[in-house]
Image (spheres, rainbow, N blue to C red):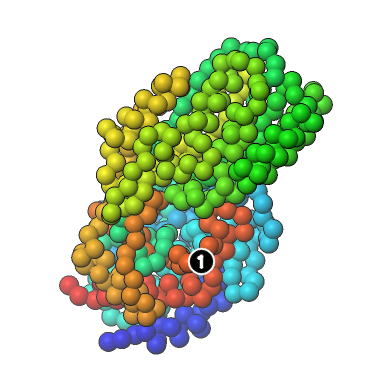
Amino acid sequence: MDYRKEIRAYLEAHKEELVSDICELMKIDSERGEAAEGRPFGEGPYEGLMAGARVLEKNGFVVNNCDNYCIDTVLNGKELQLDILCHLDVVPAGDGWRITEPFSPLVQDGKIFGRGSSDDKGPAMAALYAMKAVRDLGIPLEKDVRLILGSDEECGSSDIAYYFGKKAHAPMSISPDADFPLIFLEKGSLHTTFTASFERESALPRVTALRSGIKVNVVPAAAEAEIEGLTVEMLAPCAAAAEARTGVRMTLHELENGRVLVQAAGLGAHAAGPMDGNNALTALLSFLSGLELADTPSSSLLRKISALFPHGDFYGKALGVAREDEISGKLTLTLDLFSMDEEGLSGTFDCRSCVSANDENTKDVIFKRLEEAGLQHDNDPMNPPHYVPRDSVLVQTLLASYEKITGKKEEPLAIGGGTYVHHIENGVACGCADPAVDNHMHGPDEFVIIEQLLMSAEIYADAIIALCSHR
């Protein structure tokens, strides 16, 4: 039986409730903080889970709490067939918000603005309301679906690893934390931190400090450095040239100690798509490496690092690892964290590797280049790619539900980002985002389109029915 009309009418009738529940979750700054007793990821993620539990209970669902790592609920208590994995933690608010404050959700022009609206509090509630529609409409199911709400997806998904260390996976899993129609392949990854130390220097001119980045998976929108031995007037032509070359705005300020503060303002983006932003850090390194600095270990290292991570190199060409394959596309690489003082420096890059990348042709090559530049590095392993065949029951069913609701026949996607299902067999990321819409995920003025959430809930409800109706 086709329940599309009934599901759509139900969701339209409960639209205001859906929006209200999303806004309640968005008011909480659920960025990861310092762990404490009963709060494994800090106060914010804990409060986010508690708010999620209140929303579930308000909508008539029984909540199970897994030691404040995750909460979950099920639809009917029958044999489990499908897991839906969402998260209530968020990336840091960052700067540059104009439409509203990050944690003051604003409903305007058919959109909800604020941190977490599209990643992932809005999609989580779309999944909840899909389950609620199936339940309240009395649609018969032979098997069960479980909604899991986590609290550490943005910082490595240790929450979901803990959860599944205690509970079994469903035979199939989806995560509403990506693009439609669905993600059948997620690239592998390599996150590496490099360091160098040097003695305090006195030769001038020199860079005395450099700071940039908020998270390894976020292209930095801002960076700043302090320079001693050069004046604002002397630096201005170089700053103007760097700004013209990179598109990143360079602002100079004279400090009370006689040094000059250089502030670079670029555009943030998710590290899985560094070409969607404009990296303030690599632009600032390019500016600094072009100055006539004293011949010191620190200035030499800055030039070498800028050469290894040149501005606009999204694919690791300078590091010798540019590669691509037909299934997953191009490898991407971006330098996202950096700090330097008068005794040393540290940087961290984010590499999203294609299926054909491995230790020998990627990791070992990068590490050799770092070592040749005089940089020490950690030795974390490459995270392998995740792949679910196109012809699997899960993929084909989700594609059919997407086509039925939207009228669009589209191919599954391969992405650079890793999702909650990256380490879960027979798990795919599915929606809620429209790839044609830039909803500023991980950036300022993040938003979600309300109609997109309603459509997403329809798709999830249809998929739940299709996957859970038969033994």
Quadrant (top left/top right/bottom left/bottom right) for the C terminus? bottom left
Relative vertical location of residue 370 with respect to residue 358 in this rendering, above or below: above
Identify residue type, mark 1: Val
Specify the quadrant of the image occupied by residue 115: bottom right
Quadrant (top left/top right/bottom left/bottom right) for the N terminus? bottom left
Say which residue appears at 59% left-offset and 70% top-offset.
Answer: 111
Say which residue appears at 51% left-offset and 25% top-offset.
Answer: 304
Relative vertical location of residue 17 with respect to residue 356 in this rendering, above or below: below
Residue 295 placement, left or right of 321: right
Q: Where is residue 295 drawn, in percent x and y?
A: 61, 15
Q: Nearer the viewer, residue 61 or 332?
A: 332
Q: Nearer the viewer, residue 272 or 6?
A: 272
Query: Mark 1 — residue?
Result: 437
Please tell me whether mark 1 sits on a helix, a strand or a loop: loop
Q: Nearer the viewer, residue 247 or 340?
A: 247
Relative vertical location of residue 280 with respect to residue 292 in this rendering, above or below: below
Say which residue appears at 63% left-offset and 19% top-offset.
Answer: 342
Q: Residue furthest left?
A: 471
Q: Where is residue 149 drawn, in percent x and y?
A: 42, 57
Mark 1 surroundings within 10 Å by alpha-carbon count, few (fewer than 14), some (14 through 19), many (20 or more)? few
